[in-house]
Image: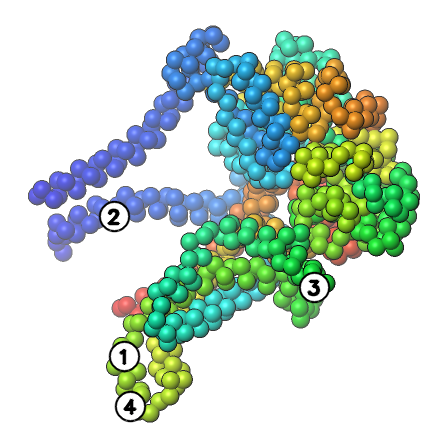
Amino acid sequence: MRITKDQLMALLFLTPSFILILIFVYGFIGWTGWVSLSNWNSLMPDLSFAGLKNYIYLFGDYRFQADLRNTVFFTILFIGLVILVGLTLAILLDQTKKMNALFRNIFLFPMALSFVVTGVVWQWLLNPSTGYNQFLKLFGMEPLWYTDTNILAGFQWGSIEFGLPVAIISVVLAAVWQMTGFSLAMYVAGLTGIPDELREAARIDGASELQIYRKVILPMLTPITMSVIIIMAHISLKIFDLIYAMTGSGANFVTDVPGVYMFETTFRGNYYANGAAIAIIMLLLVAVFIVPYLINSRRGAS
Amino acid sequence: MLKKSLALLALLCLTFALVACGGNEDASNDASDTTDDSTSEDTSSDSEEASGDGGKVEIFSWWTGAGEEDGLLALIDLFEEKHPDIEVENAAVAGGAGTNAKAVLAARMQGNDPPSTFQVHGGAELNESWVAADMMQPLNDFYEEQGLMDKFPQDLIDMVSKDGNIYSVPVNIHRGNVIFYNKAVFEENGIEVPTTIDEFINVLSQLQDAGVTPLALGDKEAWTATQIFENLLLASLGPDDYRALFAGEIGFDDERVREAAENFKTILGYINDDHASRNWQDASQLVGEGEAAMTNMGDWAKGYFNNDLELETNVDFGYFAFPGTTEDFMVITDTFGLPQGVENPDQVKEFLSVLGSVEGQDAFNPLKGSIPARVDADKSKYDEYGTDTMEDFQNNNLTPSLAHGSAAAEGFLTKVNQEVNIFVTQQNVDQFIEKLQQAAGDL
């Protein structure tokens, strides 16, 4: 096989970024994995081998169990709502051709903010001495669900109560408020991509508008839903900034997530190996979503 | 052919740029290291000024809140007045009790990029981490030169020393076992200042019956609740055994530790419902507005009452020592040291000498609401609260604060904060004691 000049050129251009990614992404993942198997739980490095000690510690740890529970509920609620709200808005936009662009921009705009900003804004909104709580106080109501420690439909599982923490809902709302614009934009693009001929054909066959959406349009949007799920899943599984700015960890760790625990245990407690183990578990959680997607899209391509 | 050579040229440029970046930094670091080592102090500072990037002191702290920032800026102003040639960089990182700043600091120290000088609490936070890791330079000669040895109480010097070497200069003293209360609320309900835990609990229930929130707590960051617990520990153990507890000589299964936990549980029955969504300022605000009667906070809260809520000391709000600890003084001291490997130790020492001077301490402390660490400071510069506290500081038993990293290493504190967070909701004394005992393995 002969390599052409163009191919050689392409190879030359790819090499530097390939090397950089190899070192600064995969190299550091490996380094984190190595630290997670070490005894480095003090200020200064100690890289002696500890086996799975740090992982075993974590899975027996009340806080980490609570983190995993919170992550599960945060991810399900967050992805579900982002898809539901985004799709609904996109269909509504699809129906009203007027001012389509204006609405789209309004809904897309929250995405321009960082999660830290969203967290601070919602923290102000929900703070007991400012925001809408003051307004509700005028009517004699005092909602505390922002830091509510109740667990809905809870049952004891290991040392933690497993169920939906009420306080998670407030964090999910803030995250959905910010990210809905993204799924909206994806779905609008998808809807525009569906040729009018298909709808026409369906109408001629006597389908109602509802049937057209259910039988024709929604199935064609499946790949977009897949993309939204993948992108939202990796955001929600490694979320840190929103929670950190908004609730800290919450009383009884009802809004704590692995990202926040990783930060605190590593950089406050100097438990570097424990922190690295949390980071690796977070990576694996994301991989559970990403890898099947990658395999699937590879199969589709070939 | 042209395309190919252009591309190759671009690639070469990129490679060189990358190599040059890395190389330059190393070279300049090496150069400055050798200047420091081989030349006399004067020439090294001269050459740094000549090269234009020397003569800078980077001051790392977490003083960004009202009052504390004013104090820091006043100190910097004084320093700049005395040393107009030295540039000051205020590298403060926001976050209550230094929670964020400490993370940034650890990363910088491990990356061999220490700030010129940094804020660190005297006690375990200094001695068991930075000094134990051999990252600080001893300041014994500096203390002798500046004549500081007899200007600080011996107990305080002991808190910033390890194995006979002194490692930092204290700038202030805070007291952690203070309760601030709303005077009007106390008067309306005819409440006397409690001095024992039993009296305190009586007062709490009296206030609750009167329809006032007895104790305001803002434990969005867990250290505020840990602070209540440490005061209860001190109350039931007494100063000597309190110190022994963190030295590992008394176990957490001691009956008196359990008593402290039981009291903690009782007291948690009298706090505001929305404590988890508030920070300490939000909680103090409740006291200022008369919605709550009392709050336990270090004396930085006094600055918050004065400056932010515009309340007058001993008119709108009063203060008393945490019940059961009236003879004790829970010390929180901010100190500044000299890390290993800073580029210009002489300029940093200039800053430390201003920081340790009467003038520097009197510029800083009245604004921050703390008292000076020096015993010979000018009392007239402090308000009634300050002079009261200065008197207590000289007469009471000094005990190191756990919540602020003086009593035990940071790792233990992190675990305690975690268990306190859980305890505040679950209030399971047995489990709490058991977890504390487990964590004590890290002491």
- The residue wearing badge 1 is A196
First along the sequence among labels 1 and 4 = 1
Tell me whether marks 4 and 3 sit on the same chain: yes
- Judging by the rendered image, the residue that carries numbered circle 3 is A139
Chain hosting mark 2:
A
Badge 4: few (under 14), some or many (20 or more) residues near its Cα, within 10 Å? few
Tell me which residue sits at (64%, 32%) in the image: B67
Determine the CA span between mark 2 and mark 3. Answer: 64 Å
What is the three-letter code of the residue carrying label 2? Leu
Image quadrant assignment for residue A231: bottom left
Chain of the residue under label 4:
A
Q: Residue B15 is drawn in which quadrant? A: top left
Do tag 2 and tag 1 residues touch (Cβ < 8 Å)?
no
Whether A148 is drawn above or below B371: the answer is below
Kind of residue sitting beneath label 1: Asp
Along the line of sight, the residue nearer the viewer: B180 or B236: B180
Report the residue at 60% width, 22% height from top: B75
Mark 1 vs mark 4, CA separation in Å: 12 Å
Question: Callout 1: helix, strand or loop?
Answer: helix
Secondary structure beneath disc 2? helix
Q: Looking at numbered disc 4 in the image, what kind of residue is underneath it?
A: Ile
User: Which of disc 1 and disc 2 is earlier in sequence?
Assistant: 2
Residue A65 sits in which quadrant? Answer: bottom right
Give neighbour class at mark 1: few <14, some 14-19, many 20+ (Cα, 10 Å). few
Q: CA distance from mark 1 to mark 3?
A: 51 Å
Q: Nearer the viewer, mark 1 or mark 3?
A: 3
- Residue at image mark 4: A204
Whether labels 2 and 3 belong to a single chain: the reply is yes
Q: Which residue is mark 2?
A: A14
Disc nearest the viewer among 4 and 2: 4
